[in-house]
Image (tube, coloured by chain):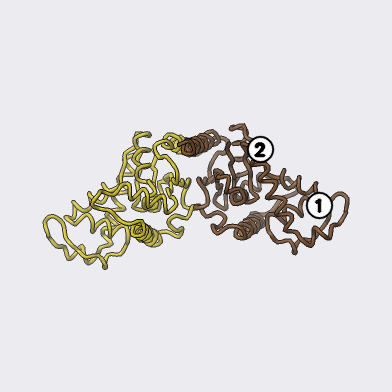
Chain colours: A yellow, B brown
Amino acid sequence: MGIITISREFGSGGRELGKRLADELGYAYYDKEIVTAIAEKHQLNEHYVSYALESGNFRNFPVHFGRTFSYSPTLMANESKLFAEQNKLLKEIAAKGNCIIVGRAADVILREHRPFNLFVYADMPAKVQRCQERAGEDEHMSAKAMEKQIKRIDAERKRYHSMISDIAWGDKRGYHLCINTTECDIKAIVPIVASYIRQWMAERKEAAVD
Amino acid sequence: MGIITISREFGSGGRELGKRLADELGYAYYDKEIVTAIAEKHQLNEHYVSYALESGNFRNFPVHFGRTFSYSPTLMANESKLFAEQNKLLKEIAAKGNCIIVGRAADVILREHRPFNLFVYADMPAKVQRCQERAGEDEHMSAKAMEKQIKRIDAERKRYHSMISDIAWGDKRGYHLCINTTECDIKAIVPIVASYIRQWMAERKEAAVD
């Protein structure tokens, strides 16, 4: 059974790599699905859940509640429940078998499962370009504004990670492989990265049998 | 024409990976050869040349001169010539064609050649174990002493690198791929890493033709 976690700088193409790897390996893929599940269960706004889980910064978010506009003071009084919920869900996913999980600090939360941890990064100009190419026409942002947004999101990821791990988010020591996607055709590297992970997992399996 | 540079933490197996990659790809391999060439040319002790080039710390070395015991005050007065010599040699090597260069800050010195830069690292216990396995019987060192030596050597590499580059030695932003060799069978990953580099080079070539 294999679990792959992908941590990525915003705009590095880590999510695309994750999705394609899941297809290549025949693994289940989880990303926003985790947020959606928690939001639906608690009838909370997805953006709120996502923000709360990624940034660990509950209090500063302008709270708009989900579809039913209900309000749960109990939950609000103890937002750490969201974390607990996420962690429980991650462990359930891990127990189901082969999967790729993007973000959610799954590398730390699932460490007892000994996942393969991949970090995806790129130079700032490459990340800005990727974000601009992906943006809809009505979402146009200047390169400067885009860079600011990339830095802000990554700073949040870093801060969240630092709350639950001694090894900083993006510190290569926390990962088995770090891929720089600058000038890199993600589609073309997928089978190669899949081979690398397969090889790593085969060795782990062998070591477990020995 | 492809140039691959390998930077590595001491004990991570980066040199082994480099040698095997050179075999796999049919590339020339350079490591200590560069030091030997400079030492022979200037009739200097190889250890001295190696230390001077890696640490950038000329003055603290107990100077023992090479085979002829000759002494060149001119050279000593201007050790930066050693750097110039190394850089010239690296550029000559790069001009010859496909090659893998381990260490020597070739990633920085040859940056105009746009090499593929690989960083190899591992957890400390894995590096200590690798070093102990490699050591001869008469070279036995405790794990503690080995760890100290690993840290000292890597600190020198880091210091040297910082003299010629804004990006720190080991900072993933300076590399195209970073491989954690902890629990990793280096022999087994060689063909996969070779594929990755081939793919990267093919893309670069395509981009150059466009």
In this orientation, does residue B73 appear? yes
Q: Which residue is mark 1?
A: B44
Q: Would residue A207 appear left or right of A186 to someone viewing this image? A: right
Q: Nearer the viewer, residue A158 or B167?
A: B167
Q: Would residue A9 appear left or right of A77 to someone viewing this image? A: right
Q: Nearer the viewer, residue A44 or B158?
A: B158
Give x and y (percent) for residue B191: 54, 33
Q: Are marks 2 and 1 on the same chain?
A: yes
Mark 1 neighbour class, 10 Å CA radius: few under 14, some 14 to 19, many 20 or more: many
Give x and y (percent) for residue B93: 67, 41
Q: Which residue is mark 2?
A: B96
In this orientation, does residue A210 appear? no
Q: Residue at x 48, y 45 (%)?
A: A177
Amino acid on which the number 1 mark rests in the picture? Leu
Q: Would residue A60 appear left or right of A121 to someone viewing this image? A: left
Give x and y (percent) for residue B178: 51, 47
Q: Would residue A73 appear left or right of A166 to someone viewing this image? A: left
Q: Mark 2–mark 1 contact, CB under 8 Å?
A: no
Give x and y (percent) for residue A64: 17, 62
Cα separation, mark 2 vs mark 1, equals: 26 Å
Marked residue chain, label 2 = B
Q: Nearer the viewer, mark 2 or mark 1?
A: 2
Numbered circles on residues, count: 2
Q: Nearer the viewer, residue B177 or A124?
A: A124
Identify the element where label 1 is drawn.
loop
Identify the image quadrant of the C terminus of chain B: top left
Q: Nearer the viewer, residue B68 or A169?
A: B68
Identify the element where label 2 is drawn.
helix
Amino acid on which the number 2 mark rests in the picture? Lys
